[in-house]
Amino acid sequence: MTQHSEEPSVHGATETSGPAERTEAPTLAEDLLLLLFQPNSGLRSGTGTIAGENTLFYTLAGAVLADLGLGDHVRTGSGRGGTNRVEAVEDHPPSDDILRSAWDYLSVKPRNVQTVLAAIGPTLRSPLLERLIGRGDIRRGTRRALGLFRTAVLEDGGTGRRSRLLADVRDLLVEGAEPQPRVAALAALLSGSGTLPQFHREIPWTSPVIARAKELEAGNWGAGAAAEAVARTVTATIVNNAVIATAALPQN
């Protein structure tokens, strides 16, 4: 994809997987990428791949914008022709570098949500993966291929955080738990990315699960405070635009 001069330079891309673990709270996009990591999907047991690679940049960009929406850093509105626009909330930048980069891009002027997804998405995978490695949730390893060559692989880091996130999403979709905003956004983004069927061992791909996931995509997150209702509206707008964008791309 051609990069334009107005597109953001996502901070954090130079981070490395050094020994020091990250201590700040993970972003929604980090949680989403960790969920999309499939620990035992490689050619050999114990190695992993990322689900939905073909549409990943739209999905991660949707998570970044949803995070900004949940934190009241951005708001959405209607543009020309009924399009959805998103703009930065003035004087309310996020502290996280990756979120701040997207907020800076939006602070220049309001933009079409689809435009923002395409602009910020392509540079997100690498720095987000480095963060997960820095936290120990994922680790890099090497395996022999064909008994001769060593190849780099991604492996589960053993922290248990992916399992906890997946359990929260399962409780929401299967058990009907009262949705917390971040978990609801994660479930909606997973559904919109088209990757939920790949979680069938933990989250049965049934008609009730599909219906619940579609409700979450639409922002039907149940009762909540007025401030949360606003965040749901913003997030649902962003998630639905991410769904539209990913639907237009080939799926894995």
Image (tube, grey):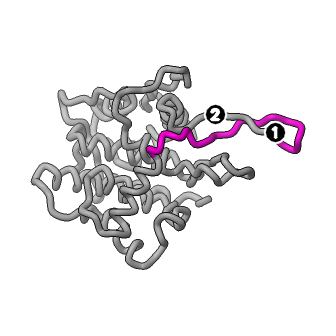
Q: Is residue 93 magenta?
A: no
* Residue at the image point whose x is 22% and y is 56% from the top: 233
Pointer 2 and pointer 1: residues touching (CB < 8 Å)? Answer: no
Give the vertical position of 81 relative to 96 (above or below): below
Residue 4 in view: no
* Residue at the image point whose x is 26% and y is 61% from the top: 219
Looking at the picture, tell me which residue is in the foreground, 143 or 51: 143
Element type where label 1 sits in the image: strand
Which image quadrant: the C terminus? bottom right
What's the distance in space between the residues labelled 2 and 1, CA to CA?
14 Å
Which image quadrant: the N terminus? top right
Give percent across and percent down for residue 66: 32, 47
Query: What residue is disc 2 on?
Result: 140
Query: What residue is disc 1 on?
Result: 144
Element type where label 2 sits in the image: strand
Give percent across and percent down for residue 96: 34, 28
Amino acid on which disc 1 is placed: Arg
On residue 26, the disc is none
- Quarter-of-image position of residue 100: top left
Give the vertical position of 59 relative to 103 (above or below): below
Q: Is residue 157 magenta?
A: yes
Segment colored magenta: 144-161
Give percent across and percent down for residue 215: 31, 68
Residue 237 in view: yes
Give percent across and percent down for residue 91: 18, 27
Total marks placed: 2
Give the vertical position of 77 relative to 105 (above or below): below
